Amino acid sequence: MRTKSLKKNKINVVTLGCSKNVYDSEVLMGQLKASGKEVTHEAPEHEEGNIVVINTCGFIDNAKEESVNMILNYAEKKEQGIVDKVFVTGCLSERYKPDLEKEIPNIDQYFGTTELPHLLKALGADYKHELLGERLTTTPKNYAYLKIAEGCDRPCSFCAIPLMRGKHVSQPIEKLVKEAENLAKNGVKELILIAQDLTYYGLDLYKKRNLAELLENLVKVEGIEWIRLHYAFPTGFPMDVLEVMKREPKVCNYIDIPLQHIADSVLKSMRRGTTQEKTTKLLKQFREAVPGMAIRTTLIVGYPGETEEDFQTLKQWVEDMRFERLGCFAYSHEENTHAYTLEDDVPADVKQQRANEIMELQSQISWELNQEKIGETFRCIIDRKEGNYFVGRTEFDSPDVDNEVLIDATKTYLKTGEFVNIKITDATEFDLYGEPEK
């Protein structure tokens, strides 16, 4: 027998997926708070409130499965009377709304990625246009994501993002500067610029790729000390960004540029608009323009038609390029994408084996690069204290996905959110150990 919970109206927002989703949840929470609602993010069970909003991811199989399991979990809690209402939003909901409504009907309402005003209305709140860029950040107070554009115009064959997020829409420079100023006032020191594609920024608004001009405006914001670039598409990359990176100390010598593959036949089928020769040349230009720059990339193995020869080409290239940071994923066959018309002909165990091989190779490269850092001193930002360590990062590392710098908290006291010069004393594949410079 279902009993209504006795908790007063408190909204718990649960976020799945990438940093773009984190940003969207923060905007939602800022709007709810401005309407006088009590709101929390991923609260522990005894504090979670009686209304739940699940912000889902629909990108690849694993992410979809996690989102569906979370919806089922809360549908069950609603059935048991532990929560009163459950709303679902985000990419999975955008992509599979009719299926979800049919398969999991015990949800109050499903919303797509562009239906924030409707979701707010269902939660008894008004959408406030004047809350430009104001949001409740869920990250440690020293860094925040800044979403500079939504959607994507690229035709990549394997990617369902345009189906879920629509066409590319850039945010105006003035709006982003205002948002950065608000964040800085709240103690944010590091901005992580995100979009489905940073490279395309400004083409719709300013009729030119305008990321460099945006950076020149953001570095003027008082209180912001680091600006980091995530998710830049390789084709058509605006090279003037590298000049700004080299000239402006606030712009981290770091870029996340998902390259996906390097064998020409695979790149062509993926509709990436580039070749091995062009990509290798671009990375060489990056390294020449900004010596010491950290390049992060992601790769996909097991794409339809990927031969053993294609994979060996990719593996050799990873060895040659010596990326500072790299992630590798097994291909996921996504309906309604161009690649879905191809036969998903690489067996699952082969995909996984290839992904493992790439990550083993990268782990060795990462170990070698980290060993070279022993004895050097880096300016680090301290994100948090965990167990007996303060955990920080250098400018070459993004939160959650890259190396961390661990400092023994039993020997020294550091303030989270502060910058400290740390001398590296030891290193593993994915972590550095250090102590404050005397």
Image: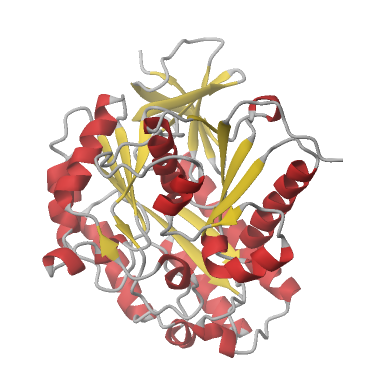
Residue 222 in the image: state x and y as whole percent: 16, 29
Residue 129 in the image: state x and y as whole percent: 27, 45
Say above or below: 354 vs 412. below
Judged left or right of residue 117, residue 49 is right
Q: Quadrant of the N terminus?
A: top right
Q: Nearer the viewer, residue 129 or 248?
A: 129
Residue 54 in the image: state x and y as whole percent: 58, 48
Judged left or right of residue 223, residue 300 is right
Q: Residue 228's image quarter?
A: top left
Q: Nearer the viewer, residue 245 or 188?
A: 188
Q: Residue 276's image quarter?
A: bottom left
Judged left or right of residue 69, residue 365 is left
Q: Quadrant of the C terminus?
A: top left
Residue 234 in the image: state x and y as whole percent: 32, 69
Say above or below: 17 vs 285. above
Q: Nearer the viewer, residue 110 or 297?
A: 110
Q: Residue at x 39, y 69 (%)?
A: 166
